[in-house]
Amino acid sequence: MIVPEKQTDVRKMYACIAKHANTYALAFDLQDLMKINQISFQAGDTALQKAVARITEVANTDMPLFRIGNDEFVLLTGYPPTKQEIARSLLEKVLSKNEETFFYQGKEIPLSLHGTMEILPTSNGAGEDFISSIQKALLSCKVKS
């Protein structure tokens, strides 16, 4: 289930995050979206759709996917800390497709994602704290690559 950023009441997203407390969230950031948008904004939209398809391809149907930024997504796995290897496997399956290409108006465009995993905090619904920590984690994994 994908919950588009512009169509979601933020309170619903925070409630969903609270419901998944103490489980793994996978966070993804589309690499080079600005560069793709220089080709055209439609190419950028296609890249976003392809990124979502890669993530949902490995996710179970009961795992909510949120767009939390311009090119950032979070998948709530529901896996507790004892299932780290399963969560990591999902992350690795998505990232294994890095550099695969898609075509836009006859042009072949490589598509890659940065990715990380975090445990959702157990708190009183402080979803904005989680979003902030995910964005920091994504920034950290961008710097490493």
Image (tube, rainbow, N blue to C red):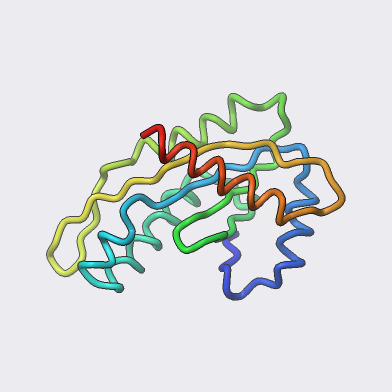
Instruction: Please state the horizontal and vertical placement of residue 72, each as a whole percent of the image.
Output: 49, 55
Q: Residue at the spot x=40%, y=54% of the render?
A: 51
Does residue 15 sit above or below 137 in this rendering?
A: below
Instruction: Please state the horizontal and vertical placement of residue 143, each as a whole percent of the image.
Output: 41, 37
Does residue 107 sit above or below 84 in this rendering?
A: below
Q: Residue at the spot x=14%, y=62% of the render?
A: 107
Instruction: Please state the horizontal and vertical placement of residue 91, each as a whole percent of the image.
Output: 50, 36
Q: Quadrant of residue 9?
A: bottom right
- 104 or 143, nearer to the observer: 143
Q: Residue at the spot x=79%, y=53% of the render?
A: 126
Does residue 124 sit above or below 24 in this rendering?
A: below
Q: Is residue 107 left or right of residue 46?
A: left
- Labels in figure, total: 0
Does residue 136 sit above or below 84 in this rendering?
A: below
Query: Dividing the image into 4 quarters, which one contains the C terminus?
Result: top left
Instruction: Please state the horizontal and vertical placement of residue 24, each as a whole percent of the image.
Output: 66, 37
Query: Dividing the image into 4 quarters, which one contains the N terminus?
Result: bottom right
Q: Residue furthest left?
A: 106
Q: Residue at the spot x=87%, y=50% of the render?
A: 124
Q: Is residue 76 left or right of residue 123?
A: left
